Amino acid sequence: MVLCVDQSGSMAASVVHAAVFGAVLASLRSLSTRLVVFDTAVADLTERLDDPVDVLFGTRLGGGTDINRALAYCQSRITRPADTVVVLISDLYEGGIRDGMLKRVAAMKASGAQFVSLLALSDEGAPAYDREHAAALAALGVPAFACTPDLFPEVMAAALEKRPLPIPEG
């Protein structure tokens, strides 16, 4: 499991929830979990996953967004694509190379990795997000939707078991 989390200012609630869920997932012995946060830089917080508070102190909200750079890093860490689920948590406002981002997602999927894009991981309503990028991901077969913390475990279980995702209406 690779959690790739946008830490730009608009994603504050998602970063908090992702840190907690990342720590929970990392505690499962049968699952290898990596937590990568990004803005225009990329930080791998995997070594801190045993303490969600430490993870939160490892993030710094703000800055721009380079999804392509973050995905390049995540892609380079995948050793068993057929057994990997990549979860991009981002509003998809890409400040990097859009075509590169889409090619990278397509390449990860072609290698056998599953890919899910969560536009937000929060209790708030419909997030603001880049609809064009969400549509481009959907065209690649990547679901892009907002997810509440209550639904997240069910979404992850479905992704790991390669079942259809319980995508919320609207």
Image: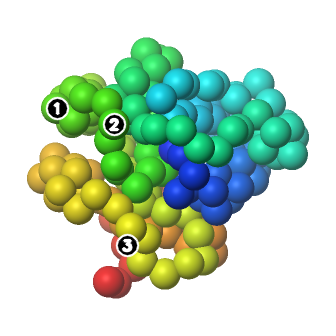
Q: Can you name the residue that lies furthest to the left here?
A: 139
Residue drawn at 78 percent across, 44 percent down? 56
Residue drawn at 34 percent across, 84 percent down? 169
Q: Provide the residue designation for mark 3.
A: 167
Distance between mark 1 and mark 2 Cα atoms: 11 Å
Quick one: SS at disc 2? loop
* Nearer mark to the viewer, of 1 and 2: 2
Residue drawn at 70 percent across, 28 percent down? 46
Q: Provide the residue designation for mark 2.
A: 95
Amino acid, disc 2: Gly
Q: Provide the residue designation for mark 1.
A: 99
Give the image location of residue 22, x and y in percent: 69, 46
Distance between mark 3 and mark 1 Cα atoms: 26 Å
Amino acid, disc 3: Ile
Of the numbered discs 3 and 1, the one sitting upstream in the chain is 1
Up the image or down, 66 lies above or below 139; here it is above
